[in-house]
Image: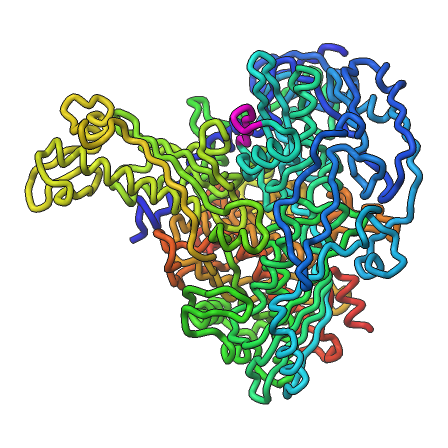
Amino acid sequence: MPKDHGIGASPKRREDVRFLTGAGNYTDDINVNGQAFVAFLRSDVAHGRINSIDTSDAAAMPGVVRIFTGADFEGVGGLPCGWGITDRHGNPQQEPAHPVLAQGKVRHVGDPIAAVVAESESQARDAAEAIKTDIEELPAVVDMKAALADNAVKVHDDLTSNLCYDWGFVEENKAAVEEAIAGAHRVTTLELVNQRLVANPMEPRVAIGDYAAHSGDSTLYTTSQNPHVIRLLMGAFVLGIPEHKLRVVAPDVGGGFGTKIFHYAEEAFCTFAAKAIKRPVKWTSSRSEAFMSDAHGRDHVTKIELAMDAEGNFLAVRTDTHANMGAYLSTFAPAVPTWLHGTLMAGNYKTPLIYVNVKAVFTNTVPVDAYRGAGRPEATYQLERVIDKAAREMGMDPVELRQKNFVTEFPYETPVAVVYDTGDYNATMDKALLIADRDGFATREAASKAKGKWRGIGINSYIEACGIAPSNLVGQLGARAGLYESATVRVNATGGLVVMTGSHSHGQGHETAFPQVIAEMTGLDESMVEIVHGDTATAPMGMGTYGSRSIAVGGSAMVRATEKIINKAKKIAAHLLESADSDIELKDGNFTVAGTDKSIDWGSVCLAAYVPHNYPLEDIEPGLEETAFYDPANFTYPAGAYICEVEVDPDTGQVSIERFTAADDFGNVINPMIVEGQVHGGLAQGIGQALMENCVYDENGQLLSGSYMDYAMPRASDLPNFDVDHSSQTPCTHNPLGVKGCGEAGAIGSPPAVVNAVVDALQRNGKNDVTHIDMPLTPSRVWAAMNS
Amino acid sequence: MSQVTMTVNGKEASGNAEGRTLLSQFLRDALNLTGTHVGCDTSQCGACVVHVNGEAVKSCTMFAAEAEGAVVTTIEGMADADGSLGTIQQAFQDHHGLQCGFCTPGMVMSTAALLKDNPKPTEAQVRNYLEGNICRCTGYHNIVKAIMAASGQDVEAMAAE
């Protein structure tokens, strides 16, 4: 019997009612009295020197309030990078300036040159088009390897080259890995591309700056996954506004997927301009602007080698990756190909020796940063593709080769510096094989063949690291921020609770799931609990939502604050019941003296805290409100096994996903309905990457996939129903809920499963030379591989 | 600027519009009906779908002036008379057919148009009909399930393949 209450129940989402009736409050739904509108003039060349900007005609256009250029931002800080990598030789990464509006040069298509503030949006756009610029186009660098050539054009004249860093991990293992590869029975090698993607949350970014001249307070409304991070970065590093004079509000946010983590120029611009013109200033991105100004994802080019002994035991892994940073360092960009990628190269396997080399490269393209999975999909993809190839070379079953090398004892310390606390990779693999009915594959293959289709099956296992922490460790790794989370639990006098969390919900359903945890802890009904988030004026300093961290880190902070509440409430109850604190039990929302029938209800205790007439004032303060900051002891390690079956049309190369099974271990699950929805969405994005999505630049740095006409988003008819399972549960050992996080798993585990399945289909049909096809597996690419 | 008048969600509504003002902009900015969302500028995403004279229309493909005198229904007009969720809306909530909620108004409006013409669609028909509505959160699994449920069909069998 499924639970209807507390942890493990699936109540309907309370936030849905406003979203289903048009009553959501997204940033673009906010209009501030007296607001003016912004339009940016953006570079249409990838690389150029700005000789002059003539705004005189534009300034005379109807409705124009003021025009800003880079000159207005001299003396204002640039956009900061939140992570510093130390290279193989102990040197810091090269870190270019990133001005709010271009100064001197433009470095990618979409780089903002000027901004018009006008009475209406259309007047602002008209005037932006009337600005005259003299920009001398320079040769652009787009290809990463070409960008590292000795005579390459430099994206940043003041840097020594286009190399951001050359990172080795673990550098001390390099020689031992070389030796193991040289002496191995077999080394399987694969070169592959993890293509550039655009996150594409359906809500484009919006920023509204507001300034109160009477108090000197600034407010920014923005589409952010982490308003406190924006307040800190923008206030401290860009505009010099102390945090008590700056409020950042991120109301309902229409999806993020990583791309709304980062601090963007438009946010700083609107906050700055509102103060400059003493009026609220609003910018709403068009989708076309989003394609050339939202941070992109992935864009790795990799060579991986897997060394094995004669029995198929993994001896060593070496991987050599070029990672595209784009033209500037986005907020967390340097961490993605390094600490979020290198540390995952053990996968689910007990490979004793691993060496990862990553060269991060500047090019004349949009900056690249974290996108759903962020580094972990790149690690999983290369590992699971090379293992599949290795199984074929070794004549082994791909499941058997994986199982032979699975980590089975925990805790397990990998050679890439992380400790898996718990897991059971055989359990999720067995579950996936069962649900996917691998035994019935031959029958289905025959049925496909009868229709003239080639069927293939792709197996994959993955691990990810979520809830990155602890803060002191990530500080050593280069993070310029802490990675704790906060919660304030405020109990009102009549017993209702308000939780102010630093986590931010932009589709994850926190308003529904977080109260389930409190209901479990107190026995109160979920309807007694309200979740408040997304406003620095109400929530304590928090780090926000990304990296599948909300329930593991934010939920844990809420548990800690609630424990404090319960402890204090028990003291009050003990006083009222004339008993010892230690004898008080809280059950079903009532405080009881153990072993007696003496009890008092939740509401009476809360009332006593705020009307403290009969109250131990000498021992405890009135009121019932507690805050906790939770800094995890370790990452969490969700893991699982995914199985994909495809049909390939041999005449056209068209791939159709026929079955998709995901068996995940997320530890304990708070709300199964929401968890399954998160996996579905991740799978869609991962399958989208595998089959359809591709962000393409031409050799001149022109963005060719700059709209939904050109960038293929998965639609309903592109995807199957998914079989998802999360019944294999090894609870996390170091957070109070035993949870691991589920937001990114689907996007991490699915691309290799799809590609493995397509290669399998071709191999089964005599295309034995096809060992790899680069994503996206469009019909033309598959057809070309079949007919090469 | 000229004045445009139409019937929106059963009530007469007027506002000023430029010749180039899109119906989506007019609904959001002039009438403050912000439930209609704009997710792209190429008429691909479908977040802005409304009904004009009973037909589903992407409101970003139509000028406000073209809707002069028309009968328009938006997401704000889809709840039952007593304010409770309508059948389609309720099915979306029951089957977790939304996450961030941004594409949801368009999905609901498209579903209403589909079920009007095809009250018992097959799953394949539902997926094909949604060709003009992009969702980035749900992978469509639960949207399709919600639509099948809203049409009164048994969806338990859909949970697995």
Magenta span covers which residues?
Answer: A242-251
Image location (x, y in percent) of residue A565: 28, 37
Residue A647 is covered by the magenta coloring? no
Closest to the observer: A669 or B29?
A: A669
Residue A775 in sight here: no
Is B52 placed above or below A726 here?
A: above
Residue A393 in sight here: yes
Image location (x, y in percent) of residue A157: 84, 46
> Which image quarter is the C terminus of chain A in?
bottom right
Residue pictured at 75% horizontal, 41% vertical: A292
The image quadrant that residue A92 belongs to is bottom right
The image quadrant that residue B83 belongs to is top left
Image location (x, y in percent) of residue A373: 58, 54
Closest to the observer: A777 or A337?
A: A337
| Colour scheme | rainbow
Is A375 placed above or below B60 here?
A: below
Residue pictured at 33% horizontal, 35% vertical: A626
Residue pictured at 64% horizontal, 41% vertical: B133
Q: Is residue A10 left or right of A707 when viewed as pictured?
A: left
Closest to the observer: B3 or A574?
A: A574
Residue A246 is covered by the magenta coloring? yes
Give the residue at the far front of this rendering: A90
